[in-house]
Amino acid sequence: MDIKIVQNLCDILDGHLERYQALVDYVAQEKKYLLEQDLEGLFTSSRMKEELAMEIQTNINVLIDSINETALMVGLPLDPQPLLADLVRHVPKPFDNRINDGSIKLERLKNIILRENEANRHFVEEAIRMVNESISILTGANQLKGDGYNKDGSKGEKKLSLPVKLSKAV
């Protein structure tokens, strides 16, 4: 067994975990910027998140290649794609623990990112909804005109009236 191949996999996995941890940090920072309404910080954080996501995507291919190389070395088939958990049972100590711990930490970090991104998305959607409602109230855009009845007494529909122009007093 070529220990260098397993060591290389562990090193690649460590780099992958560092990128995911950095992404977790940026998502948390993004939440802080959202709460503080710091648009400049938010844009910077978003740019960094995008760069990290691209690095992670590139690193995934490198990680898969290393997993495949290690799998071939230990006699595992490549179809279906071997998982890190599959390799744990076939690599020597201490690499088995390192790969297992890395696999568990990777899943945990992915879940944190998904959960926090979803929370941030809901926060942004709620803020946009509140802004839209505030604008509608200020402009009177959502006012219903009419009483809901036609001149002949039959049930009609109320229509939204849009203001002709916004008063400067607002």
Image: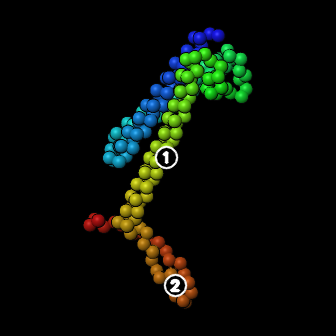
| Residue extending farthest front | 93
- Which image quadrant is residue 86 in? top right
Badge 1 is on which residue? 118
Left or right, 151 with respect to 80, comes to left
- Residue 129: give x, y in percent of width and height: 43, 58
Comparing 168 with 54, the one in front is 54
Q: Is residue 83 above or below residue 93?
A: below
Residue at 47 percent of width and 82 percent of height: 147
- Residue 45: give x, y in percent of width and height: 39, 37
Give the structural element (helix, strand or loop) at label 2: loop
Residue at 52 percent of width and 88 percent of height: 151
Badge 2 is on which residue? 149
Nearer the N terminus, badge 1 or badge 2?
Answer: 1
Say if residue 52 shows up in the picture. no
Q: Is residue 79 above or below residue 154?
A: above
Residue at 51 percent of width and 31 percent of height: 105
Q: Residues within 10 Å of mark 2 (few under 14, many from 20)?
A: few
The three-letter amino acid code for the residue at tag 2 is Tyr
Give the structural element (helix, strand or loop) at label 1: helix
- Residue 73: give x, y in percent of width and height: 67, 14
Given this view, does label 1 or label 2 mark the residue nearer the observer? 1
Say if residue 11 shows up in the picture. yes
Which quadrant of the rendered structure holds the C terminus? bottom left
Comparing 61 with 152, the one in front is 61
- Which image quadrant is residue 10 in? top right
Which quadrant of the rendered structure holds the N terminus? top right
